[in-house]
Image (tube, coloured by chain):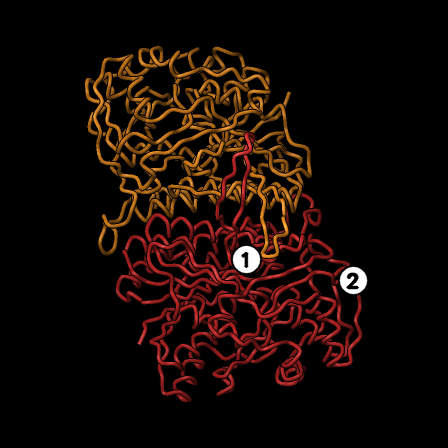
Chain colours: A red, B orange
Amino acid sequence: MRKIMILGGDGFCGWPTALHLSARGDDVTILDNFSRRDIDAELGIQSLTPIAEPDDRIAAWEEVSGRRLKMVRLDIAREPDRLMGLLDVARPDVIVHFAEQRAAPYSMRSADHKRYTVDNNVSGTHNLLATLAALELETHLVHLGTMGVYGYDGDGLEIPEGYLDVTVKDRDGRQFDRSVLYPTRPGSVYHLTKSIDQLLFQFYAQNDGLKITDLHQGIVWGTQTEQTRLHPALINRFDYDGDYGTVLNRFLMQAVAGHPLTVHGTGGQTRAFINIQDTVHCVALAIDNPPKGGERVKIINQVAEVHRVRDLAQLVAEVTGAEVEFVDNPRREAAENDLAVSNATFRALGLDPILLRDALLDETLETADKYLDRHDPDRIPATALWTSGNRPGIPKRVPGPRERRRAVS
Amino acid sequence: MRKIMILGGDGFCGWPTALHLSARGDDVTILDNFSRRDIDAELGIQSLTPIAEPDDRIAAWEEVSGRRLKMVRLDIAREPDRLMGLLDVARPDVIVHFAEQRAAPYSMRSADHKRYTVDNNVSGTHNLLATLAALELETHLVHLGTMGVYGYDGDGLEIPEGYLDVTVKDRDGRQFDRSVLYPTRPGSVYHLTKSIDQLLFQFYAQNDGLKITDLHQGIVWGTQTEQTRLHPALINRFDYDGDYGTVLNRFLMQAVAGHPLTVHGTGGQTRAFINIQDTVHCVALAIDNPPKGGERVKIINQVAEVHRVRDLAQLVAEVTGAEVEFVDNPRREAAENDLAVSNATFRALGLDPILLRDALLDETLETADKYLDRHDPDRIPATALWTSGNRPGIPKRVPGPRERRRAVS
């Protein structure tokens, strides 16, 4: 039985991962500062699915599984001393780290949201690494990164798993071969923090021998997993708003609400996708296949398939009968890009992914349609503008992240 | 007359830069949180040279030059709102950013010092960028980076100025040419923060069109400049302790104190150097040659020459008659490395650097020997250990950075 800590284990990916690992017999402790629930309150939105209070989640899981999850309220970015004390006592075999602000649009709302995202994500991840190094723990750290760190160059080169083999020629024609971290081109402050994480991991693996796996995940779709379906209080989040709702969820919501699917720009952006059930399986596979100590960071692409956004809209339209509408793109990004991604590692470990074409209808009926009466149609459009220009002078004070920070410290 | 803000303008590089720019007629405002003076107090050390209080520095400069420097106490990492308000009013043409914790050994003292260095440097730099973007200022940001972000691969490739032209081949033999940020291999948490800065700059230049020059500086040696020599209260810092004293200063101090020069490991580490007077000139040249808006970050190597540490010791020994002694290396780094660095940009702009061989004796007499009676021989050796292993369990609480943080917030 492995001792596993899930940082951010109350969130969209963290919660079903905690249940899956508990179900297979691991000893699971959740650490969470519940910031995702606080952000719901800040934005005045809620998950389409009625998520239960943390205590009720824990009780429901014990009821259906006979297993006990531990849950600790802790902010890894702002409570480094408590984190150090807790890890020194618990000495987990594995830490799965989901505890970062994870919405690109939210990270771009204002200067304050940019600062919150950087301070929260970078300090939190670095505190964790500095603590593991200081305590000399053998813990395997599994971190959820994102495909977005690679950027979307669109020159057709298949994106490798983390490292790029390059050749450099000097002026004298001498040739140098190197294997380097894939040069990142993040497109939002959120993605920027995940690129920064890569440098943090590289350093602590090299200097302190920490064992780290970084999972570069595609856009996650789907809501329920084998475990979250077992009890109404175990239900997972479904975000459909302009900040936290990813593109597929917004399409599904628009479709069942009888609105056209709004595609940003030409919809030529190609992105990688994975179902939440596969996320959970992949994290378990990553745990079971750690890097050896002294190796460089193990980077795995956690993706199942790629789609152009307009093709995705077409797919949803076919399943639901909705119309497709093209609107201005609020993001600063390439209008069209190709994307080819290697997912060789998880394929070799047996990943047989759930594909959108096969499971989209179930997801629509099980989630979007079922909880339609809980949705707020005004919250579907994306509102965050990517570039400056929307706020002359001193930006309007946005209370969210700032107030949460005060509440904790 | 340019309006220039110097962040960290009370420090070792910032102070002489402020004086140089003021002397040539720029309108200079210094922002500083005086953390470097606080760290002196934390470590129980002092600059070998008797540096004056900030107010006395300003008064002395007005006395000798007839020019008035403004000085504001501000912490860019922890007072983002004040920073925003101040920049909105001042709207400087240029910001020169030295306001980061800059000692590698200090950054490695403990988990707390690692966290302080990351939180201070990353949050501070990011706050600045988010503020410039929000205010839509045309300000040219000149940042002091370090050669240390490149790492020391030692395969003989000349280090270019920031970007590396690479060729990638895919499995089908197709070839892709890209120009990428030089893949970094920082060797300390301090250097790690400067690597992170590069990603921050890349993002804000790309997303918001910020005009940024990043100067990758070698190890700075020397103490006085044309301006700091004009009055005793203008004298610059000379650090010789194991944390802030760079290798040449420690050698000079050992030499004039009659101790052997202690070389870490084989002394085969090759490093780049530049004199403080040239630092000041280079920053002025960078200000006068900004990138255009919409360009990628302009990265310039700010170095004059390279030396192996043991050759440097030999040079100091020749000038001073000291002995050389080899001791264990507390750092985790390559024992021997080659280093070739391009400094084409500043050469083309007219840099004719002061070389160690020519000016070492003057520096010895003007500084190390002159203030010898102020030195504390116990503080010369490096004490920070690079790898974990020195602190089982919860690290001893080190009061420094933590207390400073509380004092400010």
Name the residue located 23 percent from the left edge and 48 percent from the top edge: B390
State the image coordinates of residue A46 (x, y, percent, origin top left).
59, 73
The quarter of the picture where residue B319 lies is top left
Q: Amino acid at mark 2?
A: Val
Name the residue located 46 percent from the left edge and 72 percent from the top edge: A349
Q: Is residue A210 left or right of residue A337?
A: left
Which type of secondary structure does the marked residue at label 1 adopt?
Answer: loop
The quarter of the picture where residue B164 lies is top right
State the image coordinates of residue A357 (x, y, percent, origin top left).
67, 78
Say yes or no: labels 1 and 2 on the same chain.
yes
State the image coordinates of residue B201 (x, y, percent, origin top left).
57, 41
Q: Nearer the viewer, residue A61 or A149?
A: A149
Which type of secondary structure does the marked residue at label 2 adopt?
Answer: strand
User: Is A82 placed above or below B296 here?
Assistant: below
User: Is B9 placed above or below A296 here?
Assistant: above
Name the residue located 40 percent from the left edge and 82 percent from the top edge: A23
- Identify the subunit bearing mark 1: A
Q: Is residue B159 visible?
A: yes
Q: Amino acid at mark 1?
A: Pro
Crowding at label 1, few (<14), some or many (≥20) Cα neighbours within 10 Å? some
Residue wearing tag 2: A327
Q: Is residue A316 left or right of residue A223?
A: right
State the image coordinates of residue B361 (x, y, percent, origin top left).
33, 11
Residue wearing tag 1: A160
Q: Nearer the viewer, residue A19 or B128?
A: A19
